[in-house]
Every structure is written in C-alpha cells, then in structure tokens.
Image: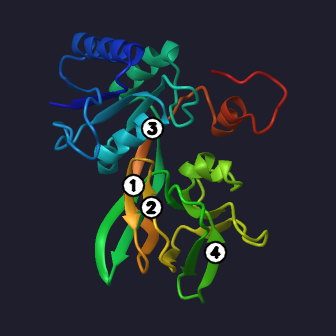
Amino acid sequence: MPEVVVVTRNLPRALDLAGWAQAYIEKNHPDFQVHLDCGNYRQDKKSSPLSGLRPDLIISIGGDGTILRASRRWGFNGAPILGVNMGSLGFLAEVEPQRFEDLLYLSLTNQVEVEERNCLDIILTRDGNVISTTPVLNDAVINKGALSRILNLKLRVDDSSSWCYRADGVIISTTTGSTAYNLSAGGPVLHPGLPAFVVTPICPFTLSSRPLVLPLGSRIEVAIELNTPSVYLTTDGQKATPLVEGDVVTARNSESIVRLVKNPHRAYLDKLEMKLGLFKRHGAVRD
C-alpha cells in the first residue's frame, strides 16, 4: 500500500490544512495510507515514531524549515516532497494553500514534474576519528557562539594548499541553500541545476576573503585552528554540534538527493522575483 507522510508545523492553520489533506486522500485515494507528523517533540530529544517509514510521497505544510525537517527524516530516501507554504517566505515550498488541491491531485496521480536537488555530506572528524556524517539539503554553518572573538579557520580544497579565513564563521552551501543564509552573508545565488556549491565567509576580517564557488565534485576541509570557546557546526539549521580545536569539517558531494515537486505554473526565476525581489521584469508572474 502506498504511504504518504504529512509533515506540518504545530500551528492551527497548518494543522487544519493537514487534516483536510488527510481527509482528501482517504476519500479520493483510499489505496494510500496517510500518516501525520505534527512535530510535537524535540528533534534532539525524541525521534519521530514515523522515522522508520519509507513513504512514497511527503507533504510539507509550513515554511522552509518544515521542508528541511521532512528531508532530514524521509527525503534523503528519494520520496518526492510537495511543499505548501504556510510561512512568511517559503522559498522551497512550491505552492500556496489556495492552489494546494490541484498540485496534490497531480502528485497522487504521478502527473507532476519532480526536480532532483544535489546534497552535500558533512563529515566531522576529531582526533582522526569520524564523529558524524550528515547529508544536508541547504547548508552547513561553522560559527561562533555568544563571545565576539574572531575565528581562525584553515581551508583546503582537494589537494590545494590550505589558506586561512579569519571571520565570524563560514557557510558551506548547496545550490538549494544559496538563497538562504548564504545570500544574507553576501554569497551568490546559484541556480539549482548547476553542479556546484559555494563557500562563503561570515563577516570576514579582510575584504579579500570572498565567496568561492566550487564544482560539485570538489572536497573542502575546514579545520578549527585556535582554541576558541563556543564554536558550533550547524547542519540545515536543524542540529548544532560543539566543535573544539583540531576538529575538521569536510564537505563533499553526497549520494543522497532530495526530490522536490515542481509547481507547473512557476519557474525558478519567477520565485527569485516574487519571493526575494532580486530583479524586476515586465509582465505578471503567474502563481
């Protein structure tokens, strides 16, 4: 029996829409089994009781954070994610609530186009031992905590010589995440069809430290040089891990991909204009 997971924020409007989606699927597509995940638990304290599922479709009702939560739990297994924007921006979410039914019907009947997004594996090594390997859809961020000391980070790309970033931190972003923290830090917008990722310093000490766009097949290592307290590695804004001097964070192309359901009425550049206001064109943007 095909399975659908509906992931939603624990807010009244989102919960109402999730309940409607469950009733719609059960009435019109009784061959599907529907599971609701309302996020009533802490990510770092308790696992979802649905974590072991391998759904055929994921419906995310909320903002971009809800999509990242859904991808972290089920999306890396290849199930397409249909994002419904109930947040303030929702750049990754492809449809607004008023158009949700149309795209839901097309998704359940396999009539939608699905876009594959490249991911990165973020590997944390300490004292020569691999501590964790985490796939990310958006980004990995190394930054300081409350203290205002500048960080010394040693970077190496593939077999090149290493160089030092002195900055508040560094963002390693996929093309998907290039419109998130990376953009706020002055990094470039990368079209999701590009086989690339970008490394962007956060508030660098020198103006010569600029974002670096790399081929997707590159391998970058970031080493924590000096013993600065309260340094963290945050993956997709979902999990923060304290770092210590000598830790090495490696980013490389991941075998995992995330598949996002595309809105047939909206192109990527339309979203850049409508949601980020990056440029203006003549004519109306279709929704």
Instruction: Name the spot of residue 168 as percent of width and height, x first.
Output: 61, 63
State if disc 1 and disc 2 touch (CB < 8 Å): yes
Q: Quadrant of residue 256?
A: bottom left
> In the picture, which quadrant includes the N terminus?
top left
Query: Is 163 left, or right, of 125 in this rendering?
Result: right
Q: Is residue 144 visible?
A: yes
Q: Which residue is mark 4?
A: 165
Estimate the spatial distance between the alpha carbons at disc 2 and disc 4, rounded to whole Å. Answer: 16 Å
Task: Give SS at disc 4.
Answer: strand
Q: CA distance from mark 1 to mark 4?
A: 21 Å
Which percent across, then down, holds residue 100?
Answer: 46, 18
Mark 1 → mark 3, Cα distance in angstroms: 15 Å
Residue 65 — which label? 3
Disc 2/disc 1 C-alpha distance (Å): 6 Å
Three-letter code for the amino acid on which mark 1 is drawn: Ala
**Residue at numbered disc 1:** 240
- Please state, as top left, top right, bottom left or bottom right, where the C terminus lies in the image: top right
Picture coordinates of residue 86, whole percent (x, y): 48, 22
Q: Amino acid at mark 3?
A: Gly
Give me the C-alpha separation between circle 3 and circle 4: 29 Å
Instruction: Write the residue at 41% across / 31% down.
Output: 82
The mark that comes first in sequence, 1 or 4, is 4
Q: Dot 3, crowdedness within 10 Å: few (<14), some or many (≥20)?
A: some
Q: Residue at x 59, y 86 (%)?
A: 162
Q: Can you identify the residue that label 2 sits on?
A: 232
